Image: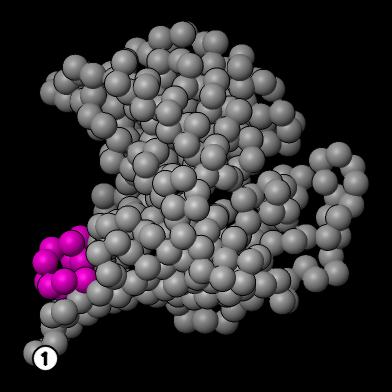
Amino acid sequence: MTSAVGGRGSTTGGDHPPVRYGIIGTGMMGCEHILNLMAIDGAQVVAVSDPNSTSREWAVDCASNDPDLAVFVDHRDLLALDGLDAVVVATPNATHIDVLAEVLATDVAVMVEKPLCTTVADCLRVKELADRRWDERGVMTWVALEYRYMPTVSRFVTASQSGVLGSIKMISIREHRFPFLDKVDNWNRFSANTGGTLVEKCCHFFDLMNLVVGAPPVRVFASGGQDVNHLTDEFIRPDGTAARSDVLDNAFVIVDYANGARGSLDLCMFAEGGRYEQELVAVGSQAKIETTVPGDSVRVGPRDGGFIEVPAPIGADIAYEGFHHGSSYREHLEFIAALRSGSPPTVGVDDGLWSVAVGAAAHHSIERGRPVLIAEFGL
């Protein structure tokens, strides 16, 4: 199968035909991608696939019951279609490695939902396949770490990288929120399927830390547990057996970076009553930057006094706000621009790998009761 759009050497000028997407996995996030793409003039969802009949029905409904929409049970049938330009992989985390191995054998660009994979070893395998495909054929692999595109977070990152901080020393992120949402077949209630909470949920935050600090993480120390949520609840797994959920619901994580900076994560998933779901702070030798989600501004406070309030509204440029304050919409616009120009992905497999590595190291630290070096994963 070949792509009709994109590849190295494409141009950005003039009119373009719509980018033809296939969506692999049409649960909550797969349908979220469909709704975002339906709001973009330069995109068209032409095919969906999911082994679950209810998920397929959701996808058809999200696509406004388009009679031309191709609907498949097996993603391999979707990949056999001619004329696809891109696919979104939004299947359960543990399936990413096998689905991506098949997608990366094609010449179709891919955006894969976070986390890239559930283990560092699987991420490294995907990286090898994706890098080879890019080097040989210029076909893009993008990791959907969409938190980068939230209005306040995007401005926070830009401000942090502007030089106003001086030498960055600390970044801290607090997420106090509700428990995990219900997913198809309860797949996200079990760490074997997700990679664990600090991979599944927190790869977003470790990606932001890595991006702002701009240096490799080298050591992780964490404390966490399952202390409130689902302590006695049993869930039916796809094989029909019942088991108790084992996902962590709170943790503190400290990350040491090669340039001497430090990051910290404060996660609580039984804290629905907070004013903000997320709070982000970066501190350097000359200033402090802070913001919130939800929110509409970023505050820059120099050490010598005063502060600057930088507006960061959702904005009229976002036609669909969705679950994540318009971030997925903005991410797809950037994905499409890169696809048409033949540019490398803004958020690539290296970003996905390092965000998973920090989460995996945090889980190892909790399990083993000691700091864990990133080098222990062969990185």
| Neighbourhood count class around disc 1 (C-alpha, 10 Å): few under 14, some 14–19, many 20 upward | few
Q: What residue is drawn where x is 48% and y is 31%?
A: 126
From the viewer's side, name the closer residue of 45 and 368. Answer: 368
Identity, as a three-letter code, of the amino acid under mark 1: Gly
Q: What residue is drawn where x is 41% and y is 67%?
A: 255
Q: Quadrant of residue 47?
A: top right
Q: What residue is drawn where x is 59% and y is 78%?
A: 271
From the viewer's side, name the closer residue of 157 and 361. Answer: 361
From the viewer's side, name the closer residue of 211 and 32. Answer: 211
Asked if the stretch drawn in magenta spans residue 207, the answer is: no
Residue 42 locus on image (x, y percent): 31, 29
Judge from the rendering whether residue 271 lies leftward or rightward of residue 205; answer left or right.
right
Residue 177 locus on image (x, y percent): 56, 72
Q: From this viewpoint, which residue is outermost toward the bottom?
A: 305
Q: Quadrant of residue 311?
A: bottom left
Residue picked out by circle 1: 305
Q: From this viewpoint, which residue is outermost toward the left?
A: 304
Q: From this viewpoint, which residue is outermost toward the right?
A: 241
Q: Which residues are magenta?
A: 158-168
From the viewer's side, name the closer residue of 180 and 354. Answer: 354
Judge from the rendering whether residue 66 lies leftward or rightward of residue 136; answer left or right.
right
Element assignment for label 1: loop
Judge from the rendering whether residue 83 lies leftward or rightward of residue 155; answer left or right.
right
Q: Main secondary structure of the magenta part?
A: loop
Residue 291 locus on image (x, y percent): 31, 74
In this view, 285 is above or below 24: below
**Colour mode?**
one colour
In this view, 232 is above or below 107: below
Q: Quadrant of residue 314?
A: bottom left
User: Can residue 114 be seen?
Assistant: no
